[in-house]
Image (cartoon, rainbow, N blue to C red):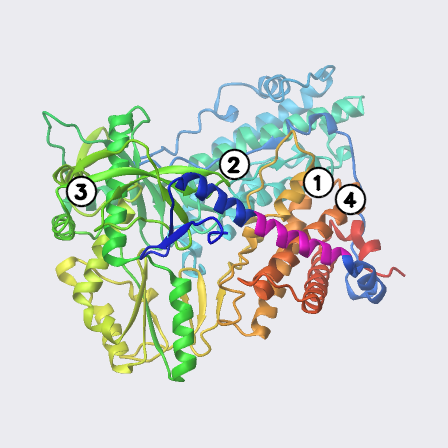
Amino acid sequence: YCLCHNILLEQDKCGAFKVSINNSNKALTDCLNVFDDIKLEINKELEDLQKEKFIDHLAEIKAKTKTKRWKIFPKESMYHHLWHMNKELNIYLYNTPSTLPSYKSYTDLTSCLLNTDKTGNEIYNFIIKETIKNNIVTNYESSIPTISVLLDQFKKKHKKFHYFSVLKHLTCKHEFNQRKSKCEYQINKKQLKLFFDLIFAKVVPLNLFGKLKNLKKIKRIMFYLLDIPCYKSLNLRPFIEKLDLSNIKWLQDIKSISMQWCIIAKFVKWFFVGFLLKILHTYFHMTSSKSNNERLYIMRSTWNLVQKKFIKKRIRSKILQPDIKYDEWKPPIGIYMLFPKQSDVRPIFKPENIKSIYYISKEKNCLNVVFKFLKQLHITKYGVTNFEQKWKSIVQYKRNEATNLYFVCCDVANAFGSIIQEKLYNIIQLLCKDLPENLMLKYYAVKSKQSKEVCYKQYFSDPSLLLPLAPNVLYSDTCKKWQQIRKTWLLEQISKLIFYQRVKINKKVYVITKGVVQGSPVSPILSDIYYNFILHKEMSAYLKAGEIIKYMDDILYITKNEMFAKQFLQSTRKGIPQYNCYFKVSKTQSNMTCDGSVAVNNIIYIGYKINCITLEVEYKRSQKYLYYSMKLIKKNNLPPLIILRKQLSNIACLRLSKFILDRTINSKMTIIKKIRKICLLQAKRACTLIKELFDSNLRSVRDTLLVVQETNERVARHIIKICLIGKKRIINKLSFHRWNCKILHILWMSYVTVFMKDKILQPKFIRYFSKCK
């Protein structure tokens, strides 16, 4: 196309292509349209090939599969007593604020009705009238005498129970039996459930829910709520409908069955929202895990001590110093958000409020200009970190040379907080030394990541500065207005960003004198400049003998020289004191033994699991439940089947990258194993989505299977495009049909395995997935 239309594509040092022609904007749009046409053409051809030789894999699997292979679950009975209150019975467990400081007293449970002067009669009337106001209950007065006595008992037991003492005793008793957790001061789920077990046994009167069987069901709801991910709500309706109302004596005075269900629904919702959740928010700090949406529970007293210790340590070490008043310029003020780590906390900087001087258009524009300059400066001096491309060259080198390679993987300790501000500014000044005083900031037309359209971005146009664009991206010059920026002005702005970072704690404003704040837009690029400079200056000898791959604070060293590998491993233990750069000993990995270190066969680096012998690579996936890492957004205006199709069609969630399915890196057998794992993951995603979207009321199983079939074909096409076609546009029909048949069979078998082991979905899908008796 470019040859026919006399379009010149110039590749820069970063691998991006500049479209050079008189009307370059139109040429860029035309080139992008050609790319889109090629993709559509290939997709259409693959779809036609799939239709050409259609095989009913589900029918084949059903014919060969017998029911006796799986444990048969009974079909659950469905009730519809509370269908009109379905939305009102949703409850949410919100995380507590992470803003520093966020202290809360243990006596702060006054908002709970049981802590007020109200009698049992008044509490009951409040529950009936104020809980789920849309649903009005009448003729409930006959139940007041019995329930009032029970609520008075409940109130007395609640006031006598020493929640803090019991919780402290439980944590002290079990602290030595704790398993390895994500945070050493968090409370594990076993301790938490024991705490609520005692509350149900000592505080909640048994007759409040009738017999022990009903109380156990309510307790089970609480335990389920403690385990759900942070983003998810819990609907109480299916749990309430399983209660046996005939055992609840105080409800028997009400003649209407429908009224009994309404009253118990209101009562259970108040019991959770007005009692149990208030206990949780008073005695625990709740936050989400770094890696997924799993909720972490920390005792409020422990979290208060952690916050105080963090503030004292920073003030004593003079990292936080009292603010100096500025006459001409006021630096932005922010607050700290604290998040738990394994044995410490991670402070994240947030602007104090959205109307801050930091966020007015002029200041924001200055920040964007500085950020772009730093990014271009970093790429010019140290290049783009492309792990996939570098790894391909390493694999090719090993196969050609047939030599052993040695690996050392390490992680910088407190990467943002350890930076020496003066040295960072000196490094930036040194890197800017050869740049001209006047730099031109101009607009470029670049392909947008979010849409197919061309967007316009500002970058510095100078022969000594590269554009920060990814490899193979197309861009072109524009005739839009440009502006001149002085280098001295840029250095002045960078100086302000480094030396005048201010944070507010307890109504006092402090200046941060060490490190760069995590959470600022420019902090990651400042950190990259600092540590890349250290690697190239202090570890230049290792660069000559091998390859150093750095991504953020993760460093991987590869060499064929064992002596250099051992020296590098020893240097990670000593660190680089002159730059305050040290490495986490617990996270250092190597495939060789040195001074008592243990050699490993597999190294974990930036989410990849690398085999040190074969150099094969795969994603390191979490062993936690799938729904912790999967967020479902329900849209009221869309039917559940359309949401299911959209979610299952999101192939990006499966992380089916060209890098993992590349035959030059992984063998055919390894790729097939990975495809099996990916197919199983897709089936588990579908299982979770169906249960979430349809709330166990799946009516049209056939329509659901049609959606699964459609998305399976899409996944198969995506894998074939990567594995078979690649950069070539030639499709071998025989190879396509063989791979397509194999992938679809693996996908359907994964669905059968997952669905037939699920006690909710098995009764609905068994007639489609197996040969019934």
Residue marked by disc 3: 498
**Magenta residues?**
37-51
Mark-to-mark CA distance, 2 and 1: 28 Å
Q: Residue 641 carries which label?
A: 1
Rendered view: 534 above or below 407: above
Crowding near pointer 2: few (<14 within 10 Å), some, many (20+)? many
Disc 4 marks which residue? Answer: 703
Determine whether, in the image, residue 161 is placed left or right of residue 496: right
Q: Going from the N terminus, do you reach mark 2 or mark 3 first?
A: 2
Q: Which residue is drawn at 30% across and 48% down?
A: 467
Give amino acid for label 1: Leu
Q: Upstream in the sequence, badge 3 or badge 4? A: 3
Residue 106 vertical placement versus 720 (above, below): above
- Per the rendering, the mark at residue 22 is none
Q: Residue at 59% across / 21% down in the picture?
A: 120
10 Å crowding of disc 3: few (<14), some (14-19), many (20+): many
